[in-house]
Image (cartoon, rainbow, N blue to C red):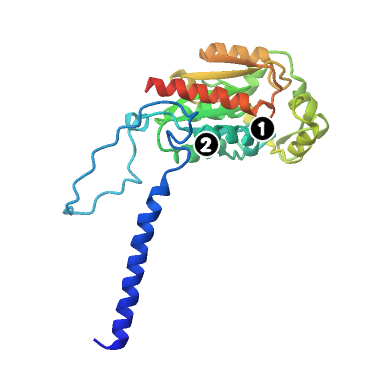
Amino acid sequence: MSPKRLLCAAALSLCFAGSAAFAQTAAPTAQRADQPGAQTSAPEAPAPVLAPVAPTAAPASPAPSTASAPRSAAATLTGPVRNIVLVHGAFVDGSSWNGVVAKLQQKGYHVSSVQNPLTSLADDVAATRRVLARQDGPTILVGHSWGGVVITETAANAPNVAGLVYVAAIAPDLHESTVDLMKRAAPAPAGQAIIADANGFLWLDRARYHADFAADVPEHVTRVLSAAQVPIAQKAFSETVSQVGWKDKPSWYVLTTKDRAVSPEVQKFMADRMGAKVVPMASSHLAPVSHAEAIADVIDRAARELSRQQ
């Protein structure tokens, strides 16, 4: 072999050797901090049973890709609940969950916050389903305000949803809309602060954002939230759900007793109708911001209880 070819062969050998060494040293760090056992405060539950590893003999034909193979409901709900998917409501975006996300991550959970377009119920459900499809194992869906409508529709027939947590959220029954439920009580003060634009979207008056939506959030924070608010399509509040996830999923409901956007009376009606476990909280409507730690604790307790049932 010529000197030039010997040099090329030596270089290729070094590349393969380096790749193998990197794979061996990187493997131990692949475990996420949010996997079971990574945090001392994480729920105690048995590890999921793994399927037997197939023999290493070469198959006669290429094996089907496991990435596209659908999981059965039983397989998806095996093991402890480690995944939390958070769904925001109107006049905020996914960042409204930031405090809750941080607390849940400290407890060892894998947390995802959906960014709803707020253009229609169907669009928000589609956005939530995309995030839900990325979860590996049992998952809790959490909805705040309008997000409750979204998780109600999304959770039905979703095999990896183990339970639902509603936070001052709308929880409709079949063919019921947000407007239908809000009529069950006197008009809330925040309703009078909602302004429709020429394009059919609703905005919350910045001057009333703090008082009617988030009275227990510092004003310097609500000024930022109101500036970054995401409007919701007016038609969304009249759209009805075609399926109801809370009919066959365990549910929890955080009832905000100082709410000026969704009447505590309406919240109690919805929670009682669902048979949800009610957690009263002396909070404004924007509880995920003003009471982030308490909301995270409710979700954590729900996950622990569901994990014990697995």
Residue 164 on image: x %, y % = 50, 24
Identify the element where label 2 is drawn. strand
Residue 111 position, x and y percent, is 52, 36
The residue type indicated by label 2 comes to: Val
Q: Residue at x 36, y 63 (%)?
A: 19
| Residue 184 shows in this picture | no
Q: Residue 72, how many percent across, how many down?
A: 32, 33
How many labels sit on residues? 2
Residue 217 shows in this picture: yes
- Is 105 placed left or right of 5 in the picture? right
Q: Position of residue 257 (x, y in %)?
A: 69, 15
Give the crowd class for mark 2: few <14, some 14-19, many >=20 residues within 10 Å. Answer: some
Numbered disc in front, either 1 or 2:
2
Query: In the image, which disc is placed on residue 111?
Result: 2
Image quadrant where one finds the N terminus: bottom left
Q: Residue at x 43, y 19 (%)?
A: 248
Locate residue 8 relative to residue 154 in the image: left or right: left
Residue at the image position 41 percent from the left and 47 percent from the top: 30
| Foreground pick, 41 / 170 | 41
Q: Amino acid at mark 1?
A: Ala
On screen, residue 157 versus residue 88, left or right, reads left
Q: Quadrant of residue 80?
A: top left
Q: Secondary structure at mark 1?
A: loop
Figure check: 23 above or below 138:
below
Circle 1: is it few (<14), some (14-19), or many (20+) Cα within 10 Å? many
- Residue 140's tag is none
For residue 204, side relative to residue 1 (left or right): right
Residue occupying image coordinates x 47% and y 25%: 303
Most distant residue in the bottom direction:
2
Residue 190: which quarter of the image? top right
Task: Kindly identify which residue carries mark 1.
Answer: 90
